Amino acid sequence: MTTKRPTIDDVARLSGVARVTVSRVLNGGPNVRDEVRARVMQAVEALDYKVNPQARSLAGGASRLLAFVFASDPENEPNSYYESALELGALRACLALGYQVLVQNVPQQTPDREKRVLDLIQTQRCEGLILSPPYSDDVALIEAALAQGCKVVTVSPGGPGRGKADAVGVDDEAGGYDVTRELLRLGHRRFGFIAGLEGHLSADRRLRGFHRALAEQGLGEGDCVVRRGDFTFRAGVQLAPQLLDHPLKPTALVCANDDMAAGVLSAAHARGLSIPRDLSITGFDDAPVAAIVWPPLTTVHQPVKVLGQRAVELLVARLTGANVSATPVFEELEHAVVSRQTTSVV
Amino acid sequence: MTTKRPTIDDVARLSGVARVTVSRVLNGGPNVRDEVRARVMQAVEALDYKVNPQARSLAGGASRLLAFVFASDPENEPNSYYESALELGALRACLALGYQVLVQNVPQQTPDREKRVLDLIQTQRCEGLILSPPYSDDVALIEAALAQGCKVVTVSPGGPGRGKADAVGVDDEAGGYDVTRELLRLGHRRFGFIAGLEGHLSADRRLRGFHRALAEQGLGEGDCVVRRGDFTFRAGVQLAPQLLDHPLKPTALVCANDDMAAGVLSAAHARGLSIPRDLSITGFDDAPVAAIVWPPLTTVHQPVKVLGQRAVELLVARLTGANVSATPVFEELEHAVVSRQTTSVV
DNA sequence: TCGCCCGATGGAAGCGCTTCCAATAGCGCT
DNA sequence: AGCGCTATTGGAAGCGCTTCCATCGGGCGA
């Protein structure tokens, strides 16, 4: 049934060279005459030869395997766009670079979650690890992986993990600032903010940007009411009443992500509010849901797929030692406020 | 930096047995005394030994690698819930079974898409292939993979591919029928239907169920207007006017998936329609978006994550030859109409 | 012209594991 | 007591590849 695949020796025999020479050609090694190189490639074509990655790993000691870890459980967190997009970007980059990615979902509440991640990289001999939030802020995990000789890159605005490993991210603080500025420009002066979970770095920075924008206009603690949610649609639905019924009577609700904003929107609809006439709402991420809800959500766009792609590229650069800096780098990508229809003048 | 990991020989030495014996214990082989087995396991623990999967593959000729292929491009198709959930289910099952999944996204319009898939399984030595729609209906691809000795399982209601490979799926025809019955029960008699792309089997069956439900009530071609979309939110937005402005004046729009239904909902909002008072809308899949839009969407639930999980389980059963039938099996999982708030009496 | 160095190639030795087969010991049977 | 049989264990080979080191020929400077 399965016709046995050709091996490197078959190629060597057909092209009349030694096995090592074929290996050299395959790996782009130096010191091979063009004529020989061509002859080998021709044999490769003729036999439809493909390198056996398992054998290569075993002999070369490099698995070319990366691990991508994410926490969100699509069961409870309806919109896993963020991780899906990261994964897809990573996948694309890997395809181009000849690496493979092992995806692992470890819900945040898993008791031995760090062990699960470490187990994966040990068991599968992964050479690189891509950590998405909130794992990207888990210094212990990062150091443990590093100690195993596994390179790490985090998708994070940098924070405790910064300085430990390479990172890619957007400037969340500026994003929060920008979207709040926009609301301020529209005349809003009383705000609600739905923040992320305690310790979620990106979300915290968004909140900080929000506060900074307020402070610039002379507004402070008394002009806004802040609540924390777990990034889910449901959290938005549940928290909305607390903000809407607050004595402050906010005219604009800023949310730390789109799902919660969608939840707020839904709750607002449910109580008969007209959006954006009665209330302005903003999200963060520019996930697909932002364009799908009614009315479409004003939000902060971040290039998630590119983030995933760059994460892999940084990792592979480290792995191959190609012009990398001695100290960890942080690569910041552009964000942008996308004004849609959930914001208007007060 | 990287401390070298212990090998099977280290375990053998520490437990005072031969390498083969350790191998036997590790693989649950027979003919090992309990005392010896315990001693070996103890050494494994002590050394924190993990089998090197690359070496195992090379020696054993089994990579324990599965490939999961999906077509949707999150770029254009905002809600990749279906594939994400399939993937997650597959991931979970693999974790339990000691297999690994290599995920590959091959957009449907890719010119050499079949080659891309075959390349992956050849290059990485995948033993099994999980095909999601529309690849699950691609007989040529299935046969090509099978010819390579790669086992295949499709996530599909069965169809041309049926009889070639194992399959898991829900009864799409019944799903279409059930949701239409519900609308009929509510008094609707004039329908619009947004179908899937030509040749998309699941979507076609949903349409067939729709027609059957109509026929049972003595309704026919003249009582409904059908259009085709590409499953995206955008398609729903674009197609809605064609149905709404049709002389038939349908009172209910049945959509082949939730994203298109969300698009229809959005278009309806845009023209000032009140849902469900002026128009009933239904989706299919029960994707997260169904609960997020306003009002929440009546739809047909299907257990996508379980589908992904069962796909892997069937595949692994084939691979290990554990009590499998000689002929391909089709495993049908339950679906259910979820009545939310986009449907009401006419 | 001679020796040296470098570019080009091949031989051999494993990487860590499984599979095949041989070896040993203990058992029930005649 | 002697035989074959089975349960248990180990030795050796080799999966397909890379890495290390040896080899060989020619161009070059002195």
Image (cartoon, coloured by chain):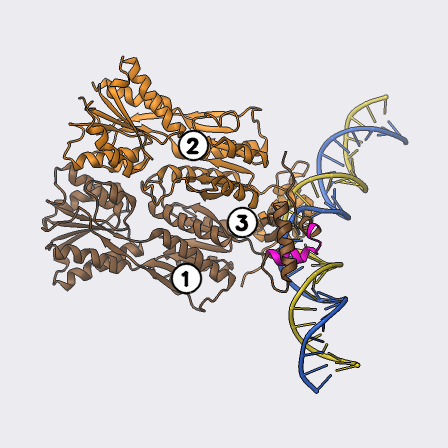
Chain colours: A brown, B orange, C yellow, D blue
Q: Is the same chain shared between marks 2 and 3? A: no
Q: Residues within 10 Å of mark 3 (few under 14, many from 20)?
A: some
Tell me: B57 left or right of A255. right
Q: Residue at x 41, y 56 (%)?
A: A311
Q: Mark 3 highlights which residue?
A: A123
Q: Which mark is residue A235?
A: none
Q: Is residue A110 left or right of residue B183?
A: right
The region drawn magenta spans A14-26
Instruction: Label 2: state its secondary structure.
Output: helix
* Rendering coords of residue B25 (x, y %): 63, 42
Residue holding disc 1 = A166
Looking at the picture, do discs 1 and 2 lie on one chain? no
Q: What kind of element bears circle 3?
A: helix
**SS under mark 1:** strand
Per the rendering, the mark at residue B307 is 2
Say which amino acid is labelled 3: Thr
Write down the chain letter for disc 1: A
